[in-house]
Image (tube, rainbow, N blue to C red):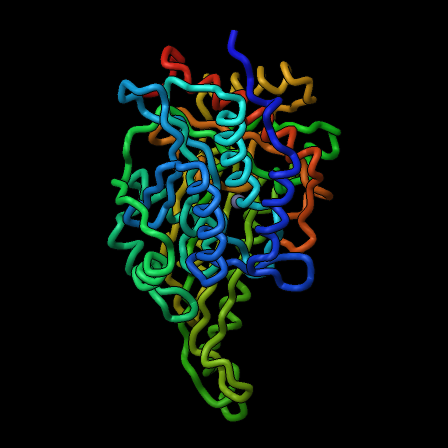
Amino acid sequence: MIEAPAGKIDVDRFRARHEAMAAIGATGRGGIDRQALTEAEIEARALVIGWARLRGYALSVDPIGNLFIRRPGRGGGFAPVLAGSHLDSQPNGGNFDGVYGVLAALEVLEALDDGGIETDRPIEVVVWTNEEGARFQPTTMGSAVYVGALPLQQALAVRGRDGVTVSEALACMLRKLPHCADRALATPLHAYVEAHIEQGPILESARRKIGVVLGIQGLRQYAVTVEGTEAHAGTTPRLRRRDAFVAARRIAAEFDRVATDAKDIARLTIGRFDVSPGTTNTIPGKVTMTVDVRHPDEHELERLDRAIREICRERAQPCSASIETLLTSRTVNFATSVVDAVREEAARLGHGALDIMSGATHDAAFLARLCPTGMIFVPCRDGVSHNEAEYTSLENMVAGVEVLAGVVQRLSRREAGVGA
Ligand SMILES: [Zn+2]
């Protein structure tokens, strides 16, 4: 029987850090704009690094900028247990998505220190680069590169909406942060656990504090380009027009139709829709849009993929449409060993828990390719996320930290039967 470090969790410290983080990139409307590798996100990383250095934890950064903070184990060269999330946000983001999981993991390390608890395995906190994908496409870039799902050179060459490449933004970050050791990609991990707000309404509705996350529904993201011909808005008769906007809105409506199901399970979102040249008196010659499709059933995702491609082929006339896949993330089922640990720790601590499938994708989806992985959800008010109104109580957050501490400590035992 191991002693859990939950008693050494310092609620005041956790709250103070959460408040300090909320000030970085604050919009003044209650939320934050802390997009990946911007001044604000770099400042947030610097703050976390400062806290880690006070404890003497080892710091390292891999070639895509993922930051690792390591509390050593008893020795023996065992692979570490990793916990964390991300510090970047959407342009109108909230104060909980991502940052909660990073602060929760750091609190676990310090609670172990304060409790005088040694672990067989090292325990590491990770800050993943560009989880949100708001500035640079695609989302979950850092974890995708880490596990080898996205080639490093391809990610480094991505140009953000502001014209800056990932490579340039990373160089800027490294100049501003204190020195961290180099870390290789895909180093072996014993397990990965991520605490996160649910970003949906299920836990709150069920009045449960902890979501035992079983897996993550699959995701496909596409860029669709519709090409027509620019022409004068006043002189071009209907039959001579190749209006890219008219074709694109027809295509968008068809996308919506094929993703509408009776049980409301499929999710399809057109989050960007750019009309070019974007002048009042010119017929649009080009429209680009992003399409984000999700479903917990991989076969349904494949059906939607075929339908979307067929719509692009069949419904663009007299224009033409092309489709590029930006990201494919298959439905993920988390490792039983980690899922069971989350469920058992929640029960042991007396926190009401519920099994749940994640509707949002997370870095954990890619980590599951590399090692046994799981997630811990806490409720968020009205299920609202990616919004400045995003909120969860300190009580909920602390419950999640307690469960994370117990799970990490359990997985950090040398004989724990998962992973490397
Ligand atoms: Zn997140």
Above or below 336: residue 55: below
User: Could you tell whether 167 is left or right of 418 in the image?
Assistant: left
413 or 243, nearer to the observer: 413
Above or below 313: residue 47: above
Residue 206 is situated, as x and y percent measured from the top left of the image, at 73, 29
Q: Is residue 306 visible?
A: no
Residue 297 is situated, as x and y percent measured from the top left of the image, at 50, 33
66 or 146, nearer to the observer: 66
Residue in view at x 59 percent, y 33 percent: 377
Above or below 85: residue 92: below
User: Could you tell whether 111 is left or right of 55 in the image?
Assistant: right
307 or 68, nearer to the observer: 68
User: Could you tell whether 397 is left or right of 325 in the image?
Assistant: right
Image quarter for residue 162?
Answer: bottom left
Image quarter for residue 77?
Answer: top left
Residue in view at x 62 percent, y 22 percent: 7
Q: Quadrant of the C terminus?
A: top left
User: Could you tell whether 104 is left or right of 150 in the image?
Assistant: right
Q: Residue furthest bottom?
A: 235
Q: Is residue 321 visible?
A: yes
Residue in view at x 53 percent, y 54 percent: 89
Above or below 295: residue 256: below
Residue 399 is situated, as x and y percent measured from the top left of the image, at 65, 28
Residue in view at x 45 percent, y 83 percent: 240
Residue 37 is situated, as x and y percent measured from the top left of the image, at 42, 58
Q: Residue furthest top?
A: 1
How many numbered discs?
0
